[in-house]
Image: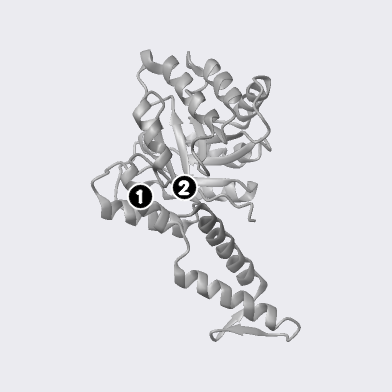
Amino acid sequence: MSDFTPLRSVLYMPGSNERALEKAKSIACDGLILDLEDAVAPDAKPAARDAAAAAAASGDYGRRTVTIRVNGIGTQWHDDDIVAASQAGPAAIVVPKVGSAAEVQQLVAAMEAAGAPDHTKLWAMVETPGAILDALAIARASERLGAFVLGTNDLVKELYAEHVPGRAPILPSLHTALLAGRAAGIAVIDGVYNDVKDTAGFLAECEQGRQMGFDGKTLIHPGQVEGANTAYAPSAQAVEDARGLVAAWEDGRGAGVVTYNGRMVENLHVESARRTLEIHEAIVALGS
């Protein structure tokens, strides 16, 4: 059984909406972010905290990776959010606007003080210029850090940039976060696509993110799940090619030069092929 956890589609769900929490049990997403921050009005935050913690602790979401997004450091809700989320024991606690390695260490210390189990990781939202410039230090700040989540809306705002097809204004930032995440061995999840009615634009951005190397995409609507799942899964042709390449490598071991479909095969190609098969097998195990 592979240890790889698919994160093709990570759907934000408001922690304050009981119907949404119930509906999420039947949505074919790889991951859920039960949100206590942007999706919840200030007066509803305490009740949302309780509901999200209960949902995350329930075990009712099957193989989905269930996380809780708390309110940011320095807000009046943050400390109580961290305690409740840690005690609920989700797969991860997602924290907005993490800006430094010191903040990562502060967050991890707070999680551990609150009794977070070993399996509960920290996912840091990278969404400010400072976080991008310090991305490698943030990514390496703690063994408990499991992922970067790109906050592309905030990043565009902070840069005084514009949302445009192809995302040219923020590509350097996206690449920097990916470089840091890969160097540290953590997952890196792309930001949201805002226009839920623009299917073509969304699918194009999913394809771009997969080509860049993201593990998956955060989503704001259940209607985006299928597109992300398809875009971030190896195609049938890619799986067939990977199997053929690995077989050719194993058959030709010791022969000097190995070729597959007329192309010379080196160890790096085999590693990529094996990763493709690992992702495919993990997705098949999820049943989606």
Residue 265 drawn at (x, y percent): 62, 78
- Residue 203 figure quarter: bottom left
Task: Please state the total of marks drawn on the protein image.
Answer: 2
Does residue 244 appear anywhere in the picture? yes
Q: Report helix, strand or loop for mark 2.
A: helix
Residue 155 drawn at (x, y percent): 41, 37
Above/below status of 31 relative to 55: below
Are the residues tagged 2 and 1 within 8 Å (C-beta)? yes
Label drawn at residue 174 = 2
Q: Which residue shows up at 49% across the image and 38% down it?
A: 61
- Residue 41 figure quarter: top left
The CA span between labels 2 and 1 is 9 Å
Residue on which disc 1 sits? 167
- Residue 142 figure quarter: top right
- From the image, which quarter does the C terminus lie in? bottom left
Q: Which residue shows up at 59% across the image and 66% down it?
A: 272
Q: Which residue shows up at 37% across the image and 16% down it?
A: 44
Above/below status of 239 relative to 282: below
Residue 109 is left or right of residue 96, and the answer is right
* Coloring basis for residues: one colour
Label drawn at residue 90 = none
- From the image, which quarter does the N terminus lie in? bottom right
Quick one: label 2 or label 1, which is nearer the N terminus? Answer: 1
Crowdedness near tag 2: few (<14), some (14–19) or many (≥20) residues, C-alpha within 10 Å: many
Residue 239 is left or right of residue 255, and the answer is left
Amino acid bearing label 1: Arg
Residue 189 drawn at (x, y percent): 48, 45
Q: Which residue shows up at 60% across the image and 25% down it?
A: 86
Amino acid bearing label 2: Leu
Residue with the most extreme right position: 254
